[in-house]
Image (tube, helix red, strand yellow):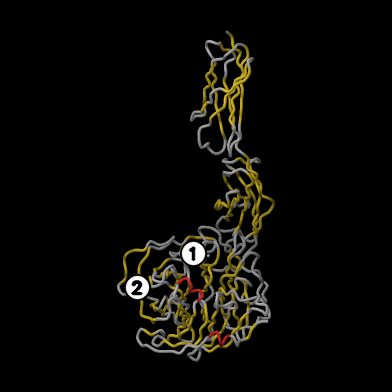
Amino acid sequence: MVPASLTDPSEAQPCLWGTQLNTAHRSGRLAATLLAATLAGAGLTVAVAPVAHAAPYDAVAKLPISSYSAIAVDSVHERVYVADNNFGSQFNQGVIAVYAFDGAWVTTITTPRHVSGLALSADSSVLYAGVRDRVLTYDTTTYANTGGVYGATDTCGGSVAFSGGKAYYTAAYSWYISDCDNAHTDMYSYDGTTVASTGWNDFGRLQLEAGPGDRMAVGQPLNTQAADPFLAVFDTSSGSAVKVASRRFADADGKGALNFKDVSFSADGGKVAVADGTAGTRLLNTSDLSDAGTAYPALPAGASASAVAYSGDGTYLARGAAASGATPDLLLAPADPTDATAPLEFAFEGSLDGDRVAPRGLRWSADGSRLFAVTTNAAGNQYWLHVIQPPAVQYGARFTGDLSHSPVQAVAGEPLAVRGKLEYDGPAPAEPLKVRATRKDSAGSHDLGTFTVKDDGTFTVLDEPDLTGDATYTVSFLGDLTHRPADDITTTVTVAKAPTAIALNAPAEATLDGGVTITGTFTAQGKALPERAVLTVERTDRLGSGVLSSVTVAADGTFTINDIPRTRREVTYAVSWPGDDLHEGSSAQATVFVRR
């Protein structure tokens, strides 16, 4: 069934997109508490705002979403829209979180189905939200639902872009929601009244991106039906989507296929940059999608491309990635690939920032003064919105010398200090810099948190290792607005068992009739024992040796040994504890002269 407008049903005749593209040129990373108040007729719920917190990246807000699909930036009203696709079920509602340009929460819009795409009209008066089985429209001043268009053939939800005066959207059909990534997908246009099929279709979650000059790009992610995905550029100025160029990237041996994550047009529309999860950043000529003469530098080692966005003023290209530690997740480079100016670098790591830039998670304000970046954690179930105002310059930073630690012999369960020094160029920061530390031992990796760098560059990481063996400490400086991240520095510390001690207080002499009483104390450093220590007592006299009844140490560490000697002369009492996984064993002995 063909999608129908909510006000004017229309029909369209689809044709195979894949057939036409085969003739194209081929290459050789604090959920809000929702309130019960619903604005009548608006499809709008009001939520308590997650608070934006000051961070090295200007401002960060924890998003009230657990999954992510799209971001749109309204520079007229200074609003940022972030969508939660909530794709666990085809009947799930969706969420569009709305923020101001300073990172302050404004409101939350709930949609009847999961949200898969967002786009704004040319004047930013209308927000288009692609949801399962329809495209909804919202007023960008009241956030009220103003209608939309049904897409009855759509069971998965699609991408949305506004180009050439129309909203273009994709609609995919799959009997099983789990197969939506591989479903057959059609593209339609909607002018506010009428829906029309563009005739273009293929497999997978096709992603649409509008550009200057009424250009629109369509990228095909890898899926089971497309071993060699395409990228295409359309001209929409005539009111229809006319293909200008298309390209598949695999060579004759099937290598080099596009691993599409995101695409962005340069400010003048002459270039498109593609975030390729395998190849990094591809820079192509818009006219025919051939490789540009000068490419952008490769992403840092260990970083996998996830997003890309040109600033509207033509100054920057933002490249997002998934990386770990101090390896940058975001690079802001000059838009001109021949400009060798060092990029601005940002690394995200931890519970206040996320761990990586989410796919398609970058957008700029129209004037290029702010970059909005959606980050996610490694699990992909928490999200943050970063508002970044790029500085004029970033300065270098580096760790100098080696890490040291005290005490020299680390002990399980006792405090350990790891010390180092960070040097940085440029002016002194307005707020003290911070480093982040992790410990990796036989139980895995442990985040130790952040530690302040003093004015002289020194810092101290405080920890209490709780396992014996080698513990590797890694210290990272993730950078801030004016300082680039520094290469990580590590040191390996051997953690020993904690010492224990037994002290005995025995009489010099005793009698056979009076017996022997010995008191003592048992002390254990490090982690507290799970149970009271049980001491072994051995007696040695002129008749031989034998083990007496064991003694349990009291809560305060004291114990008492009572014995009736069996013979005169010297009697030696040896008291010992064998130790455990975290504590060394210990022993002590005392000799008593026994008279008749």
In what quadrant of the picture does the C terminus appear? top right
Q: Residue furthest left?
A: 40
Q: Residue at x 66, y 70 (%)?
A: 298
Q: Secondary structure at mark 2?
A: loop
Quarter residue 283 falls in: bottom right
Q: Secondary structure at mark 1?
A: strand
Q: Residue furthest top?
A: 596
Q: Residue at x 54, y 52 (%)?
A: 449
Q: Residue at x 31, y 66 (%)?
A: 37
In what quadrant of the picture does the N terminus appear? bottom left
x, y percent for residue 568: 60, 11
Amino acid residing under circle 1: Trp
Amino acid residing under circle 2: Gly
Q: Is residue 452 visible?
A: no
The residue that label 1 is drawn on is 384
The answer to which of marks 1 and 2 sits earlier in the sequence is 2
Marks 1 and 2, how far apart in space?
Answer: 24 Å
* Image: 243 above or below 477: below
Image position of 36 (left or right of 99):
left
Image position of 31 (left or right of 230):
left
The residue that label 2 is drawn on is 43
Q: Is residue 481 visible?
A: yes
